């Protein structure tokens, strides 16, 4: 019994150390968007988000589902550290557990997931930062 409990405790600690259910899912930086400068947004896998250094707030289930899909779709681009030069403001940086992707709105050759990610970032900026 004691060994089983000890194993369970270790498994829980390992999950928490790796992010567990409330670890960061995706983070965005938006420059030239609705805000005056660079806005930093962080979403956790348990459905909360933060604007800058603000408090974590619950996001809608629809936003969380979209964020999970975007994070999954960005995996290959993030692993490769892709950067899409050109384009206009706003400019975006997405950070996931796999790496970083950078792009500007309207840059040539954008994979279809990046406009989706940009739309999500701008909606989250509005929801979490109260801008726009």
Image (tube, grey):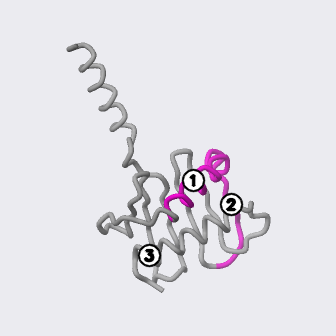
User: Residue 55: x, y in percent?
Assistant: 29, 66
The magenta-colored residue range is: 63-88
User: Could you tell me which secondary element the residue under label 2 belongs to?
Assistant: helix
Q: CA distance from mark 3 to mark 2?
A: 21 Å
Q: Which mark is residue 71?
A: 1
Q: Residue furthest bottom?
A: 132
Per the image, is 82 magenta? Answer: yes
Q: Which mark is residue 127?
A: 3
Label 2 or label 1, whichever comes before in sequence order: 1
What is the secondary structure assignment of the residue under circle 1? Answer: helix
Single out the residue that lies furthest toward the right.
Answer: 109
Choose top left, top right, bottom left or bottom right for residue 43: bottom left
Mark 2 — residue? Answer: 113
Q: In the visual, does 5 lie left or right of 23? A: left
Please report contact status of discs 1 and 3: CB closer than 8 Å, yes or no: no
> Which residue: 47% across, 52% down?
25
Q: Residue at x 61, y 69 (%)?
A: 118
> Where's the N terminus, which quadrant?
top left
Secondary structure, magenta segment, majority class: helix
Percent x, y of residue 115: 67, 68
Distance CA(mark 2)–CA(mark 1):
10 Å
Going from the N terminus, do you reach mark 1 or mark 3 first?
A: 1
79 over 69 or under it: above or below: above
């Amino acid at each position: 019994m004691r060994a089983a409990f000890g194993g369970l405790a270790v498994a829980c600690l390992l999950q928490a150390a790796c992010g567990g259910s409330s670890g960061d899912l995706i983070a965005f930086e938006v420059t030239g968007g609705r805000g005056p400068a660079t806005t930093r947004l962080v979403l956790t896998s348990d459905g909360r988000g933060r604007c800058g250094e603000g408090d974590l707030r619950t996001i809608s289930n629809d936003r969380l589902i979209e964020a999970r899909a975007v994070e999954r779709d960005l995996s290959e681009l993030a692993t490769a550290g892709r950067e899409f030069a050109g384009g206009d403001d706003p400019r975006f940086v997405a950070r996931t557990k796999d790496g970083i992707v950078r792009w500007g709105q309207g840059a040539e050759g954008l994979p279809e997931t990046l406009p989706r990610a940009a739309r999500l970032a701008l909606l989250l900026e509005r929801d979490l930062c109260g801008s726009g």
